[in-house]
Image: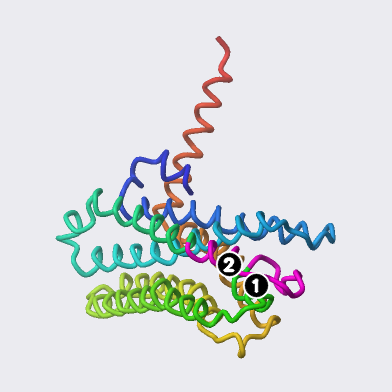
Amino acid sequence: MILLILLESRLHTPMYFLLSQLSLIDLNYISTIVPKMVSNFILGNKYISFTGCGFQIFLFLTFGGAETLLLVSMAYDRYVAICFPLHYATRMNKRVCVMMIIGSWVLGSINSSAHTGYALHIPYCRSRAINHFFCDVPAMLTLACMDTWIYEYTVFVSTILFLVFPFIGIVCSYGRIFLAVYRMHSGAGRKKAYSTCSTHLTVVTFFYAPFAYTYLRPRSLRSPAEDKTLAVFYTVLTPMFNPIIYSLRNKEVMEALRRITHRICFSKNIDKLPT
């Protein structure tokens, strides 16, 4: 998707620029968790160094935080495009788009740095076995030998800011979009818009809901088995389905893919012509 958007000039629009960033984040996000998890299951070597654990926490929270904010930007982009099409060029210009992306990365990194720094400085005097398939901060807190209620409160606040508020913003944006679509005169256009928006909203819900539910619960109500099941949704399934939902079901993307493929095949045939 990143290469396709880069190579195809017709996809050089704010929507696809944001989509390329989502693809980049998902690629790094899933690579932070899955390769290590798979190697642990296959090789049976369920070990990670303390430094490696901290590095995994930082990357996971950075990419996760950036994605939660970027999805809000993408929902706003669709909201402006459908509800205010005449103002789209001014409201979603290049500068606004770049600021949205930079803001997502910077805020995600700052939030991640704070949580990673605290998690690595907690004294751990119990078992060093983390009951999870990756270094998840809530799972690590159960191993601490100090009262972590203050930090758990900061996790609660951070979850509200990075998950609950963005999700509310996305739902409101899609609510306005559904309302605008409902007023369309074209039945085919209405059906297509409903299908696309409902699919996007479903994928977003599968990402935000398990994430928020995991991090909003107090430690006394946590279940390791339940946390691991929920984590599969926001660490594996959502990043895997995002390219399919946002891209492969998109007619413009598929047409661009065919043009790029035809261009590559044509250039290869030209090279094979006898001289």
Query: In this picture, is 101 found above or below 225?
Result: above
Q: Residue furthest right?
A: 44
x and y percentages locating residue 1 in the rendered image: 48, 49
| Residue 229 in view here | no
**Residue carrying label 2:** 119
The residue depicted at 69 percent of the width and 55 percent of the height is 35
Q: Tag 2, which secondary structure?
A: helix
First in sequence, mark 2 or 1: give its number.
Answer: 2
Q: Quadrant of residue 246?
A: bottom left
Residue 213 position, x and y percent, is 53, 82
Q: Magenta stretch?
A: 114-135
Q: Position of residue 274 (x, y in %)?
A: 58, 13
Q: How is the image coloured?
A: rainbow
The answer to which of 116 and 203 lies nearer the viewer is: 116
Relative height, residue 7 to residue 274 (above, below): below
Q: Which residue is mark 1?
A: 140
130 is within the stretch colored magenta: yes
Extreme residue in the bottom direction = 221
Q: Dot 1: few (<14), some (14–19), or many (≥20) neighbours within 10 Å?
A: some
**Residue 137 at what x, y percent from top left?**
59, 71
Residue at point 51%, 66% (across, down) = 115
Task: Measure how far apart labels 2 and 1 are at the Cα level.
Answer: 8 Å
> For this view, does 197 lie left or right of residue 35?
left
